[in-house]
Image (spheres, rainbow, N blue to C red):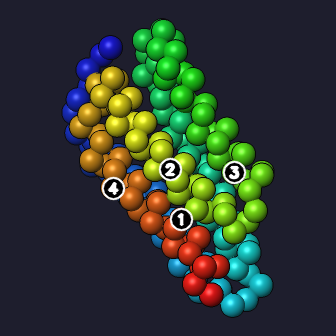
Amino acid sequence: MQTNDRSPLRTARLLGYAGLIPFFAGAAWVWAVRDTPAVGFATFALATYAATITAFLGGVHWGPALREGGRDIAALVWGVMPQLGAWLVLLLLPSHLVLAALAALLALCYLVDRRMYVRAGLTAWLPLRLQLTLGAVASCLAGALLPVLR
């Protein structure tokens, strides 16, 4: 394992925070159109963005694994699990549960990453990873709470 335990550069932080914009905007949009037929599309937009980010979080693990010649089987296997989970959530769950399930999946990705990043020598990235996860999870939960609070 190569160690790359340096803090994320400013560019990575800015891109990470920019990636929260669709989460925050999506949650705000869900609430803004809550009493209109557009709420279904707004919820779908937030859910599909959450699913794509979940897929990205899995794929990130392939970089360090491939750098090691693909010998880290756990990283390769975990690297495809978030995509499969997000796909199944979108495919199988009723719409009123999708955002809550994606929030849980995003949180699970962070919990796994807490171990996997240490193994990959990326511990310094965990504070940023936590901040981004909290923003994404909060946004999904805000959208998921709408049917409950109606």
Per the model, the C-alpha gap separating discs 4 and 3 is 24 Å
User: Are the residues tagged 2 and 3 within 8 Å (C-beta)?
Assistant: no
Per the model, the C-alpha gap separating discs 4 and 1 is 14 Å
Which residue sits at x=40%, y=41%?
111
On the rendered structure, is 16 left or right of 124? right
Quick one: label 1, few (<14), some, or many (20+) residues within 10 Å?
many
- Using the image as rendered, state which of residue 106 and residue 41 is in the foreground: 106
In primary-sequence order, the first of circles 4 and 1 is 4
In primary-sequence order, the first of circles 2 and 1 is 2
Report if residue 66 is visible in the image: no
- Using the image as rendered, state which of residue 18 and residue 47 is in the foreground: 47
In primary-sequence order, the first of circles 2 and 3 is 3
Q: Which residue is mark 1?
A: 140
Element carrying mark 3: helix
Q: Position of residue 94 (x, y in %)?
A: 76, 62
Q: Position of residue 21 (x, y in %)?
A: 47, 66
Per the model, the C-alpha gap separating discs 2 and 3 is 12 Å
Q: Which residue is mark 4?
A: 131
Q: Which residue is mark 2?
A: 106
In primary-sequence order, the first of circles 2 and 4 is 2
Q: Amino acid at mark 2?
A: Leu
Q: Position of residue 7 (x, y in %)?
A: 22, 39
Q: Which residue is mark 3?
A: 89
- Using the image as rendered, state which of residue 108 and residue 31 is in the foreground: 108
User: Please, is residue 132 above or below residue 7 in the view?
Assistant: below
